[in-house]
Amino acid sequence: MTDTNDNTNPSPGVTMTVNESNLDRAVRGGIAVTALGAGTAIGGVLNPMGIALYGIGTVAAVTAVSGYCPLYSVLGISTLPQPQQS
């Protein structure tokens, strides 16, 4: 039996290259910690505002860790410093 599933690129045409600077990632990390902590402090998943804060915190954490923001890609934005050309 031959495996015809090529897993080298699971989504052809989609590239997840880093498009966030270290400062951007640090700010997102801070937002994630703050939002997750606030969501927990106000009741967690038993409170609609807690659920919203968990969602915000989770998205901020994932983008901070990966260094990739899908919205930046859609808008053509990158906060990475551009290399200096001589």
Image (cartoon, rainbow, N blue to C red):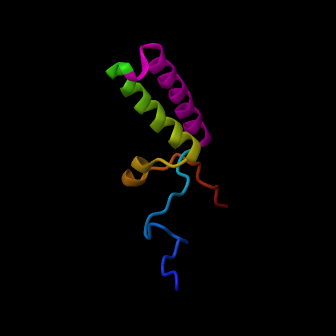
Q: Residue furthest front?
A: 1
**Residue lying at 61% horizontally and 40% vertically, measured from the top left:** 22
Quarter location, residue 25: top right
Please determine whether, in this image, residue 85 is positioned above or below residue 7: above
**x and y, in percent, of residue 47 in the image:** 35, 18
Task: Please identify the quarter of the rendering in which residue 59 is found.
Answer: top left
| Residue 33 magenta-highlighted | yes
Seen at 59% across and 48% down, the residue is 81
Query: The magenta stretch spans which residues?
Result: 21-45
In x, y percent, where is residue 74? 37, 53
The residue positioned 48% from the left and 76% from the top of the image is 5
- Furthest residue to the top? 42
Predominant SS of the magenta segment:
helix
- Percent across and percent down for residue 10 are 48, 67
Magenta-span inclusion, residue 40:
yes
What residue sits 64% from the left and 60% below the top?
Answer: 85
The one nearer the camera, 55 or 84, is: 55
Residue 53 coordinates in the image, percent (x, y): 41, 25
